Every structure is written in C-alpha cells, then in structure tokens.
Image: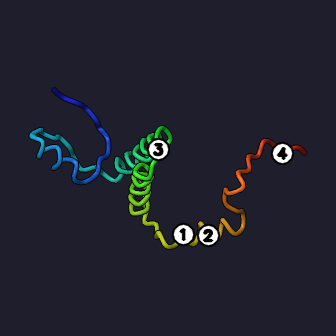
C-alpha cells in the first residue's frame, strides 16, 4: 500500500514511520520549496483548528509560526514588542467588534 502526502512534516516523522516497519520516502526542501510548504502547513493547521479547536491544534499552529519566524529571520521578542505596540495603538479583539461598513 502507498499513501502520497507531499507535505511538510515534523522532523521525527520519517523515523517514526520507519519504526512502524514502513519505508518513508522524503527529501529536504530547498528554501523556495520550504517557504511554500510552510505556508501550506500553516493553512492545514489552521483548518484543523477551525474544525476542532483545541490546545493541541493551537500548539501545532504555533510550531509552524515558529518555523516561519526562523525561516524569515524574525526575532520572536521583537514580534511580541510589535504585537503589544499594535494592541496599544489599535486595541485587541476583546470587544468582538465587527466593522460592517464605512459610509462617507
């Protein structure tokens, strides 16, 4: 039996598959491919969270966010500072405000 995935997986997945007596076929992504696969993975994890919100699914999203930060050379502490600056200037989402339209 053969199942085709062609998607980015966590680093230990090939060894876990091999330990089950199966043969994983994989390659190391180039920078161009990694960028696309990370974005695909983000959307995949977001879809899973949307279908079944849980801490585990949120942790998966955060793992992909960490990988995207690393890929782009973003400093997580700097991102947190930016997040807080934006929150101070524009607010968060606690009030659940949905902007319907702007007239004029």
Q: Is tag 2's residue or tag 3's residue first in the polypeptide sequence?
A: 3
- Crowding at mark 2 (Cα within 10 Å: few <14, some 14-19, many 20+): some
Q: Is tag 3's residue or tag 1's residue first in the polypeptide sequence?
A: 3
Kindly report the distance in space between the C-alpha atoms of the residues bearing marks 4 and 2.
26 Å
Kindly report the distance in space between the C-alpha atoms of the residues bearing marks 1 and 4.
30 Å
Name the spot of residue 29 as percent of width and height, x first. Answer: 28, 49
Q: Nearer the viewer, residue 13 or 5?
A: 13
Q: Are marks 3 and 4 in contact (CB under 8 Å)?
A: no
Image point 47% across, 69% down: which residue?
A: 76
Q: Are marks 2 and 1 in contact (CB under 8 Å)?
A: yes
- Crowding at mark 3 (Cα within 10 Å: few <14, some 14-19, many 20+): some
State the residue position of label 3.
49
Q: Are marks 2 and 3 in contact (CB under 8 Å)?
A: no
Image point 52% across, 72% down: which residue?
A: 78
Q: Is tag 1's residue or tag 4's residue first in the polypeptide sequence?
A: 1
Please state if 90 lies on the left or on the right of 48 as rendered: right
Please state if 58 lies on the left or on the right of 24 as rendered: right
Give the structural element (helix, strand or loop) at label 2: helix
| Image colouring | rainbow
Find residue 102 and name its label: 4
Q: Is tag 4's residue or tag 2's residue first in the polypeptide sequence?
A: 2
Kindly report the distance in space between the C-alpha atoms of the residues bearing marks 3 and 4.
31 Å
Residue 73 vertical position relative to residue 8 in the rendered view, above or below: below
Residue 97 vertical position relative to residue 5 in the rendered view, above or below: below
Find residue 80 and name its label: 1
Q: Are marks 1 and 4 in contact (CB under 8 Å)?
A: no
State the residue position of label 2.
84
């Amino acid at each position: 039996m053969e199942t085709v995935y062609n998607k980015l997986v966590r680093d230990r997945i090939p060894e876990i598959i091999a330990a089950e007596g199966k043969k994983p076929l994989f390659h190391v992504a180039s920078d161009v491919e990694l960028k696309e696969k990370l974005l695909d993975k983000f959307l995949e994890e977001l879809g899973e969270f949307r279908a079944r919100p849980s801490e585990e699914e949120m942790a998966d999203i955060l793992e992909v966010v960490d990988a995207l930060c690393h890929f782009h050379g973003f400093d997580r502490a700097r991102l947190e500072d930016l997040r807080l600056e934006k929150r101070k200037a524009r607010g968060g989402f606690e009030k659940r405000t949905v902007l319907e339209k702007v007239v004029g």
